[in-house]
Amino acid sequence: MTGWAIVLVGTIATLWSIGAAIYWTVRPGETDPSHPKYSILRSDR
Amino acid sequence: MSVSVELLRDNVEPEDVALFSTFTISATAWLLFSTAVGVLLSFKFPYPDWATNPALSFGRLRAIHTNDAFYGWASVALSGAALYVASRTSGIPVAGKRFAWGGLALFNIAAILGTITLDMGINNGDQEYREWVWWVTAVFLLAVIFTFTALLTTVAKRVEREIYISNWYTLGAFVFTILLGITAYIPVYQRGLGQVAVQAFYMHNAVGMWFTFLALGVTYYALPKLLNRPIYSYALGVLGFWTNLFFYPVIGAHHYEFTPLPWWFQTLAIVFSVGMLVPVWAGTGNFFLTMRWQWETVRRSYALPFIVVGVAYYFLGSTQGTVEALRSLQTIWHLTNYTVGHSHATMYGFITFIAWGAIYALLPRATGKRPPVLATGLHFWLATVGVTAYVVFLSVGGTEQGLAWAAGDPFIASVEAAAPYWAGRAVAGLFMFLAHVIFAYNVFMMTVGPSRESDRYERRPAPVQST
């Protein structure tokens, strides 16, 4: 029984992460110029 | 004229250049050796009476091919790139250099000892990717710990406030692999069902938590630098990191469906194999969205095409892995050559292409020496055509094998069905090996070879905005 409860939790986690992935694909965000994704483009990085 | 970013040179300490170069040269030597063994093995299928000396027997050489490709080539190549990425993103030279050099030496000692012992018939039994006896694996784990120390010290001393996502992935790879290696050799897990579960845990996580994390980590640095454009979504990268960490450790059990392992555990492995679509598709989407509308830059680059193929195989190979986990398909494909095709789609199409892309992207920036364009093009096309043909041949041949077994045909019928595909695989393997010889020449030109007029640098263009 415990095993199948783990399967249920795993299924819920899978569905949640699919939703999160869709959200961040549509809204990538991170517009602050000081964000690390911009700072690594400097010539000294 | 558009400017290829590969023409730019980083301001790097000479010892860091030597470190990166030596890791790459060492890895390349193991690539040549392990894949020469692979080519020999591939010809044993159509010509089984060839090279039957025990030292050249299939059982010994097969483990040498896989272990040296894993731990001599891919581990060393990606560790060298990871150290370079950590240094650049942290804004300081590689810290703990003695540990880095020590790690490189230990990687090589482990691979040499592993090769000798396996060829002498001294091994850990029929346990894929951990055929090395425990004391050889202990040397390998020491190499991982030494290199991790250098990596962690570098990141800890960074001048930036945040740890860049590349280092999340690469540090995670080292931490998890240390745990993985220790767990897999605990004596109580060396027999019975515990041995089966731990073998699944080790075999699959060596790919998914070591090589995948290292490859994704260097891609999150190399790709934006090559395009001079920020990664599309940093948050997607973070989600990919945590979901990979959550889903991956259990899915190895999908290699042991229909065994005495608990049924719910097998089901969990299948559910999490589906869950793995999240980090895989999110990562693939993130990389391709970063590349969008930059295809001319990709075409002109000698590093980006390798990364494009690597990301494409990451998507295809990993999605294929999810599909293979489904019980209805596992009954046909399990234990056939289809699985060998799948492992080459991932470890070669994905991991090795990303390693090449990272080396072509970063090594010239460190040494100031570019690879010859023609040789790089030949490397790319021979390897791409070779691995694609290899995967297609074994996928079709493996399916025919599985269908013959499921139909209850005599075993020899499955051998006869697969034989033409084995010959095709051997020819494809020759293409791949030839690509490796050219890559070795390019590594020579990027490291110890003479400087050329075409190594001049050009001005960095302004960053391209992502949105």
Image: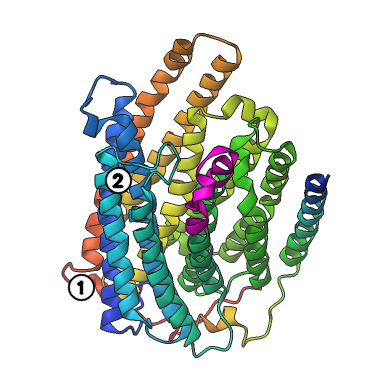
> Disc 2 marks which amino acid?
Ser
Image quarter (top left, top right, bottom left or bottom right) of the C terminus of chain B:
bottom right
Give the number of marks.
2
* Picture coordinates of residue B412, whole percent (x, y): 44, 11
- Give the mark nearer the N terminus: 1 vs 2: 2
Q: Is residue B3 left or right of residue B267?
A: left
Main SS, magenta region, reads: helix
Q: Is residue B386 left or right of residue B244?
A: left
Q: Is residue B424 magenta?
A: no
* Picture coordinates of residue B148, whole percent (x, y): 43, 71
Q: Is residue B290 left or right of residue B398?
A: right
Q: Is residue B455 left or right of residue B95?
A: left
What's drawn in magenta, residue-wise? B180-199
Can residue B334 be seen in this snapshot?
Answer: yes
Q: Which residue is mark 1?
A: B453
Q: Disc 1 and disc 2: Cα gap in Å? A: 34 Å
Q: Which residue is mark 2?
A: B34
Q: Nearer the viewer, residue B434 or B260?
A: B260
